[in-house]
């Protein structure tokens, strides 16, 4: 399919700043890849082009498209996420930034552990021991460009205390050669701002910048781009302010709304031809989003012919909503619609349970999107501790977690003594002589010695020719009884299976990526590189394979995806919009969420609510979402499911027999 005129304008642009305002389904990824391919064809070296996205998955898809257009030349293109690029720059300029050795990314639990230590050592009463409150305050201050010195110059006691905490927190991270996610943007900003030579080299390395999903950038990411683009300002950004749904995690919609102020003289190209959804769906999306005042005006136009199936329903209660949606999904699948072409979307994951139960009862395979990343789950974090301490004995937090997982009888006091003794051996906890640790009982000294030997043996095993690190660490965890301890601690079979599954998938991924040169040249470097990569991966980067499965997801979890049939459920005040958004008067981002949900649909869109829902043991009346009213659609009231067919009768009978069997009641076989 040929590019339309506005797409051609964007692709042909070469110099100076350009904002491509790309509506949902308007072909923005194609515009980005065609522009990169065109630049390479025009003789611009691929190594001078830097393209930034927000997920590894998006970067991989874009890289493959460019490869198909540009062949081998595309290999020299730098295509990265913001945080991966930030880590690369920090590692390349570690000495300039004050780091010694390989830099490690701290996960959330490690950040909390450091903050807990800092809060216990800094005299202050503002935050107490509340690590979440302190972490949020630090992140907000740094997003505004404030460092510890600036905070400590404040006359406010609270701000001054935050400055002391931030200063000590930075010192603790530096001792570990560790960085948090904020550092991966903040440190490159410092590098570009304060080091003229480094800035000049990086601007010369990448004189052409392209940025995807620009509406999701933060204030600091904008600062980073401005410094990197320099005076030439050869930057093209693609985004849609109507799909800005991440302000809650630091994204700033003003970046795209005021792009012409941040990059003076910018050209603007608007892509409003939608190649995904039929007209009826876009009519609903356009009507709803027009209620937002803080936006760039545009109206999506359908390129797909034919009528869409668009409905607004009110179910008598929440259980009926799940039952009818599940029944309808099962039927359309039997009629030929692929399961992977169907999505049920909601504001929060907690709303998914009745739909999970209903689809399972009808034997419809599904996947749940929008939960925790693998890197946030306990089994993976435990494995990361073993990998990290094998990579570097100076990683105190990893050492503390690994040597106490599973428990070996080492209390915090003993660990503190071991850490204190490591100063004599350069901070390497694997070189501490157990006998030299003052006050360490013989039994605990033996635990330390055994653990050190275990990790040193793991180092030897991964360095052997042809070694498979997944097998090595599977063996190490088996030797320490990790799996057996999980089986003792987790009595729920489903939860246990998930934990073990997370562990096995991570070990398999370690094997499959082990030879990637980007992880590092030495086995120990590769271990740290792998952990860093996993910690930087987003939830969408590791979503389950969707083939043959209905998608149950939060709206945030399917941004950028598309489905033939979309059901948006639970559209009530307090759900969408949330009560917090109603109380704060911050409704525009909530409205954008419905816009994003609706524009995932290609052929059919069903928007639904329940008249009542159970809250505890009470049935509570629900108020329809104001956004439903804004759609202009007439509402259909549903008070009973459609009459069951033979397949559904059999499924219901199987479910009934299973419930009775749990109570010791056995029914004879029966068929309708």
Image (cartoon, rainbow, N blue to C red):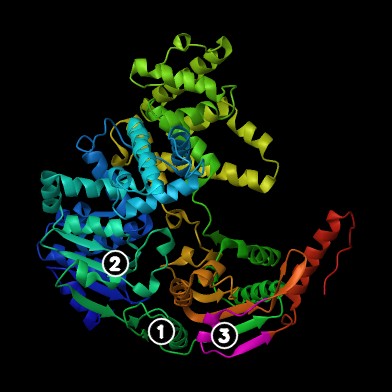
- Residue 354 lies, with reference to residue 487, above or below; the image says below
Q: Label 3 belongs to which residue?
A: 311
Q: Label 2 belongs to which residue?
A: 255
Image quadrant holding the N terminus, namely: bottom left
Disc 2, disc 1: CB below 8 Å? no
- Percent across and percent down for residue 369 are 52, 60
Question: Which numbered disc flags the more N-terminal residue, 1 or 3?
Answer: 1
- Residue 105 in view: no
- Percent across and percent down for residue 100 are 26, 30
Q: Label 1 belongs to which residue?
A: 290
Q: Say which element carries label 3.
A: strand
Residue at 20% across, 64% down = 36
631 in magenta:
yes
In this picture, residue 622 sits left or right of residue 250:
right
Residue most toward the front? Answer: 155
Disc 2, disc 3: CB below 8 Å? no
- Residue 96 lies, with reference to residue 369, above or below; the image says above
Q: Residues within 10 Å of mark 2 (few under 14, many from 20)?
A: many
Range of the magenta residues? 622-637
Question: Which numbered disc flags the more N-terminal residue, 2 or 1?
Answer: 2
């Amino acid at each position: 399919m040929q590019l339309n005129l506005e797409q051609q304008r964007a692709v042909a642009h070469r110099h100076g700043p350009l904002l491509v305002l790309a509506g949902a389904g308007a072909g923005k990824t194609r515009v980005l890849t065609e522009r990169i391919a065109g630049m390479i064809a025009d003789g611009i070296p691929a190594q001078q082009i830097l393209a930034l996205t927000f997920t590894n998955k998006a970067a991989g898809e874009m890289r493959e498209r460019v490869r198909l257009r540009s062949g081998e030349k595309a290999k020299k293109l730098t295509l990265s996420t913001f945080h991966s690029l930030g880590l690369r720059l920090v590692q390349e300029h570690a000495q300039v930034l004050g780091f010694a050795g390989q830099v490690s990314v701290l996960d959330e639990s490690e950040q909390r552990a450091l903050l807990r230590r800092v809060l216990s050592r800094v005299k202050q009463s503002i935050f107490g021991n509340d690590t979440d409150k302190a972490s949020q305050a630090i992140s907000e201050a740094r997003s505004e460009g404030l460092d510890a010195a600036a905070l400590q110059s404040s006359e406010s006691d609270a701000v001054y205390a935050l400055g002391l905490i931030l200063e000590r927190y930075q010192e603790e991270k530096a001792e570990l050669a560790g960085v948090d996610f904020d550092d991966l943007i903040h440190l490159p900003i410092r590098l570009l701002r304060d080091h003229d030579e480094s800035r000049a080299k990086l601007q010369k390395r990448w004189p052409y910048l392209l940025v995807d999903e620009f509406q999701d950038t933060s204030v600091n990411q904008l600062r980073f781009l401005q410094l990197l683009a320099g005076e030439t300002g050869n930057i093209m950004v693609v985004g849609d302010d109507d799909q800005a749904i991440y302000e809650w995690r630091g994204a700033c919609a003003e970046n795209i709304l005021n792009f012409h102020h941040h990059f003076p003289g910018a050209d603007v190209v608007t892509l409003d031809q939608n190649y995904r959804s039929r007209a009826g769906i876009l009519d609903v999306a356009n009507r709803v989003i027009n209620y937002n005042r803080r936006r760039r005006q545009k109206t999506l136009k359908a390129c797909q012919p034919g009528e869409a199936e668009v409905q607004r329903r009110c179910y008598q209660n929440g259980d009926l909503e799940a039952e009818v949606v599940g029944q309808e999904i099962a039927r359309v699948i039997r009629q030929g619609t692929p399961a992977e072409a169907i999505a049920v979307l909601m504001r929060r994951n907690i709303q998914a349970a009745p739909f999970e139960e209903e689809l399972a009862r009808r034997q419809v395979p599904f996947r749940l999107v929008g939960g925790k990343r693998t890197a946030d789950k306990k089994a993976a974090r435990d494995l990361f501790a073993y990998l990290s301490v094998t990579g570097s004995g100076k990683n105190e937090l990893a050492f503390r977690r690994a040597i106490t997982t599973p428990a070996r009888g080492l209390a915090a006091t003993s660990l503190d003594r071991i850490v204190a003794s490591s100063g004599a051996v350069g901070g390497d906890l694997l070189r501490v002589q157990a006998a030299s640790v003052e006050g360490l009982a013989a039994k605990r000294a033996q635990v330390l010695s055994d653990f050190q030997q275990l990790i040193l043996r793991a180092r030897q095993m991964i360095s052997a020719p042809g070694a498979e690190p997944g097998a090595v660490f599977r063996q190490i965890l088996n030797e320490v009884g990790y799996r057996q301890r999980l089986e003792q601690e987790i009595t729920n079979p489903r939860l246990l299976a998930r934990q073990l599954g997370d562990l096995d998938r991570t070990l398999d991924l370690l094997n499959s990526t082990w030879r990637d040169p980007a992880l590092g040249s030495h086995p120990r470097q590769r271990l740290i590189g792998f952990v860093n990569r996993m910690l930087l991966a987003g939830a969408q980067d590791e979503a389950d394979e969707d083939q043959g499965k209905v998608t149950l997801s939060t709206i945030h979890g399917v941004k950028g995806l598309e489905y033939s049939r979309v059901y948006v459920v639970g559209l009530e005040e307090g759900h969408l919009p949330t009560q917090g958004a109603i109380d704060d008067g911050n409704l525009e981002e909530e409205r954008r969420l419905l816009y994003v949900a609706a524009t995932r649909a290609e052929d059919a869109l069903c928007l639904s609510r329940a008249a009542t829902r159970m809250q505890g043991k009470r049935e509570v009346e629900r108020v329809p979402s104001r956004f439903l009213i804004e759609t202009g659609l007439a509402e259909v009231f549903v008070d009973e499911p459609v009459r069951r067919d033979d397949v559904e009768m059999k499924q219901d009978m199987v479910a009934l027999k299973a419930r009775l069997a749990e109570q010791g009641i056995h029914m004879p076989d029966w068929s309708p």
